[in-house]
Image: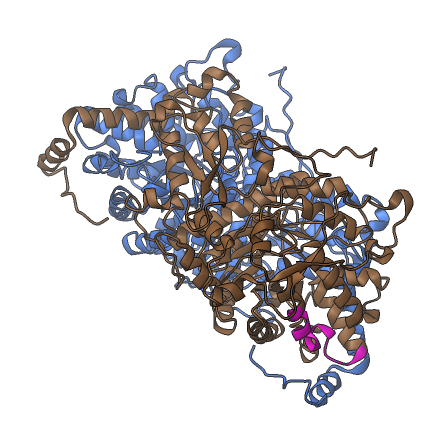
Chain colours: A brown, B blue
Amino acid sequence: MKDLTLTVTTGPLPASRRVWHAGERHPDIHVPMREIDLHPTAGEPPVTVYDSSGPYTDPEAEIAIDRGLPRLREAWIAARGDSETYGGRHVQSADNGFAEGARLVPEFPVHNAPRRATQGRAVTQMAYARAGIVTPEMEFVAIRENLGRKAQAEALTRDGESFGAAIPDVITPEFVRDEIARGRAIIPANINHPEAEPMAIGRNFLVKINANIGNSAVTSSMVEEVEKMVWATRWGADTVMDLSTGRNIHNIRDWILRNSPVPIGTVPLYQALEKVGGIAEDLTWEVFRDTLIEQAEQGVDYFTIHAGVRLHMIPMTVNRVTGIVSRGGSIMAKWCLHHHRESFLYEHFEEICEIARAYDVSFSLGDGLRPGSIADANDQAQFAELESLGELMQIAWACDCQVMIEGPGHVPMHKIKANMDKQLEVCGEAPFYTLGPLTTDIAPGYDHITSGIGAAMIGWFGTAMLCYVTPKEHLGLPDRDDVKVGVITYKIAAHAADMAKGHPAAQIRDDALSRARFEFRWEDQFNLSLDPETARSMHDETLPKEAHKVAHFCSMCGPKFCSMRISHDIRAEAQKEGMARMAEKFREGGELYVPLEDKA
Amino acid sequence: MKDLTLTVTTGPLPASRRVWHAGERHPDIHVPMREIDLHPTAGEPPVTVYDSSGPYTDPEAEIAIDRGLPRLREAWIAARGDSETYGGRHVQSADNGFAEGARLVPEFPVHNAPRRATQGRAVTQMAYARAGIVTPEMEFVAIRENLGRKAQAEALTRDGESFGAAIPDVITPEFVRDEIARGRAIIPANINHPEAEPMAIGRNFLVKINANIGNSAVTSSMVEEVEKMVWATRWGADTVMDLSTGRNIHNIRDWILRNSPVPIGTVPLYQALEKVGGIAEDLTWEVFRDTLIEQAEQGVDYFTIHAGVRLHMIPMTVNRVTGIVSRGGSIMAKWCLHHHRESFLYEHFEEICEIARAYDVSFSLGDGLRPGSIADANDQAQFAELESLGELMQIAWACDCQVMIEGPGHVPMHKIKANMDKQLEVCGEAPFYTLGPLTTDIAPGYDHITSGIGAAMIGWFGTAMLCYVTPKEHLGLPDRDDVKVGVITYKIAAHAADMAKGHPAAQIRDDALSRARFEFRWEDQFNLSLDPETARSMHDETLPKEAHKVAHFCSMCGPKFCSMRISHDIRAEAQKEGMARMAEKFREGGELYVPLEDKA
């Protein structure tokens, strides 16, 4: 421990403050948001934006990653009286890939006894929602989603195309409850991850993004992974998946969970495979089940489960250009072939649900047969598995478990909408969670962009969460810079989707930034952008002086050609003369002037 | 001159050769393409890709930018017998912004007398096409567009959604002629720019991209601009616009034109404004006309003309969030307001057409009132101007002039298609040429991505050429790295659009790359990608050794978790057993196995 520098990135974003909104039904909840202050000359109130960064951006918060974050939800969970702490599973050497001595990442220093449902109880948000209970988590989410809407409700025209989504003008706690109850949204919130700030994933909420982190056998360390998590949430990741393989998985995950303000997802199969030495066919239900308990006790908020890969579907993949590209899918396919039987995930799916409902672990039903190339998009294997996921979802729902459905992958633009339509058809409107999709295969090194295009589109069509793709996809593990570029790209896609869906408050930030642009408030342009640091540094490359921050031009066009400056002259002239009079005069102008038609 | 290092980037891309296909009707034409060799283990022929890079990537070519490129089309032009060389306009000090002495960029060393149509003749590709003549340029374009199609015609399924575009299985010279004749495509090819390799812009051809370069009053120099042009075409820019303002415009443009293998576009208004000291209201038809002649004689292939900005439309922009954001549009609006009359561009549009037809300068009818923010998208001003552009286009067509129509700008996803539909409706299917559009305003520093999303979509819907946006948009002038990122992003957008439209050969490269991926041919993956250097360097960050170039895994998942490797095992097992038998056995498997439904 002494050798580790336990520091992560902290401090507010430029001109930003973390503020809290208190609950009404539950006055003890305090929902964080970020307010971006504008320059006094703007004469505008601060712009409030969604804040996934947790206490790290709060200068008042004391951050120590060997103590972890405050246990925000602990009292809410305890107050429900339907769960209890217990001794918990004993950590084994295999949990950390048999790492020993100096190679063993130290345990997280603080131990909290795990909590699980008392016998037979369901402690899921879905169970509460179905029972008519509005939990603090639900009200938290309502306030969080609702930011800025009341103030803007009248100002904004809702002219989007929602493709059947029904986003209300204002989100009420009751609306959240209803969406959770019918399975159209989830709040991933393991009772053993009380540090996380509740968030919702669903078609009628803001489109969310997930960032993947995790070490592999080849690279990465513990502090690096915690920092990647903090770094990803700083730029806007709504959930983080820890996809670690190799050694030290258990201990690294503990450090991540205890410090994460967002839900953490995993693919338990990866750790189970490590426990059997990487031999897929040696996997057993017992090893897998034990891994689920291990991770549920640690507080993992959602599990990707590849139970939809059925034996009869495997031949459908053999003539594909890229076969099976999901790691979990390929592992299970290999197991199924070797044993010539359905997977233990499929056969034991109800037992998996029993575990999930005792901790409120949500499911992300994995698309083990997603297409890995344009050639394989929307094929028989992919859609057969999607139907299978819809069936499994019904089983999970019957157990009061929260579910989302994973989607592709690599899909050309004209085949994207069919994915969403099919998912809505066979998966009862459960949230769709897609990886991209990548719209072409020919740009390794730029797959954040090939996939950002597809992500924006499928987000518009109704996908609830977009799993980011970094520039390193297909080439290596993302570093810090890649994580940031991936997150920003996916924030763009999600935001573009919100706006196209007609989300009532999405355009507020665009309008504020565009007004800043028109009024040459450069500092406000930087501060309102998704990545203020990059915007500022690009501007400063050619115009570094402070005086240029108020200049009425930039280096793109120089002072003489600044269209915005000229527009101000035009506006001034119009105001001087009176708009109505001006238009009148133009209409009177004789044959040169054509009538002003109102076609807009 | 002695102080200048006149070097630009040359040399082939990795594993690539420049090859030529000879014409049939015109045996003296030789159409360049790039062949990418694959590893011998692939057992596949080279992949042929479109090549916009000119002689710079040919190791046999002698490059000297003070001599310029070979005058490829000179003989074809002369052979038509409808044009003649003449003394040409005298270059004036004002043409270079009165730069003198050391500040004056030297003239291009080789002088060629300009050529123009003999009295009253139209030397445009449209005029020839309408007269039933298939020019060498048209056959060149047919061969160029046609790459790989014949070989693949049977293999590929054309399952795209073309929204009314009609891309034939194979492009014939006669098809090109027909598309040009009806105005649905253009070949920008000034008779004074014989160095350029003919290319087509139209809805039934590959989607093209444009890269903007140019110095401003604040920054940049001559060699830098020539290098940017070479660099942009190296990565795939199909045309380049020189948007220089400030001093030395004339001389820098000469250097660019003499060395450019792609059509060069300009906004003549920028230079005209320099000539009147930057005072918009001092612009006159005479100065503008003189500038058109100057640039036509130099060989500019297309002019952006903002003649659609009409006096009665200006009041429509006054209540916009960002007013008028087109430089040309704002300059003309200011002129119109000051003089209280229609612009000289509008009033003299027929005379402008007379000039264009004497040199074959194509028009890019500028969208001076395009929206500069999400808030202003698809408003009355924008669509009123689009209708005006449709009217002007008819005048240009009557003069046998080639026309494309410029489009936005900033447009949220749900409003993009309306732009394309309206353009098709009012502009007679003339090629649409859009800037992005940007799908959100909140990501300065990443506007290549915000706009790449919109560009891919509008390209799919039918836009013929996409004007790139670099990461520096709104912040400063792009440098070399920005130019590359912008070009690659737009190649992605254009290619994704081609594929979604159902272009018969677009998927060839995707499939080849995906096969390489599945077979762990890392070198082939790099070489087939749009940016081999970046793909390779990202891979080498974690696995730098040569041995890793044949490794059957990468650092993303490590060896144990490689889904592709597992897929090979599955395929091997299937082949051993026989696919049919395997599927059979699964179906027989009893109650666990559900019937294999054929739903794909």
- Decide whether residue A345 is among the magenta residues: yes
B136 horizontally vs A477: left or right: left
Q: Nearer the viewer, residue B340 or B174?
A: B340
* Magenta-colored span: A339-354
Which residue is nearer to you in this view: A22 or B18? A22
Q: Vertical placement of B23 versus B347: above or below?
A: below
Viewed as shown, does residue A195 lie left or right of B271?
Answer: right
Q: Is residue B231 visible?
A: no
Is residue A155 one of those drawn in magenta? no
Q: For the point 56% across and 58% down, which residue is it?
A: A80
Q: Say whether residue A511 is visible.
A: yes
Residue B127 or B486: which is nearer the viewer? B486
- Residue at the extreme right: A101
Residue found farthest to the top: B101
Residue B213 coordinates in the image, percent (x, y): 50, 32
Where does the N terminus of chain A fall, quadrant-wise? top right
Q: Position of residue A239 (x, y in %)?
A: 59, 50
Say which of B595 and A246 sits in front.
A246
Counting from the top left corner in percent of width and height, residue B180 is at 39, 53
Residue B520 percent across, percent down from the top left:
77, 58
Give the dominant element type of the magenta stretch: helix, strand or loop: helix
Question: Which quadrant of the structure image shows residue B290?
Answer: top left
| Left or right relative to A116: residue B316 | left
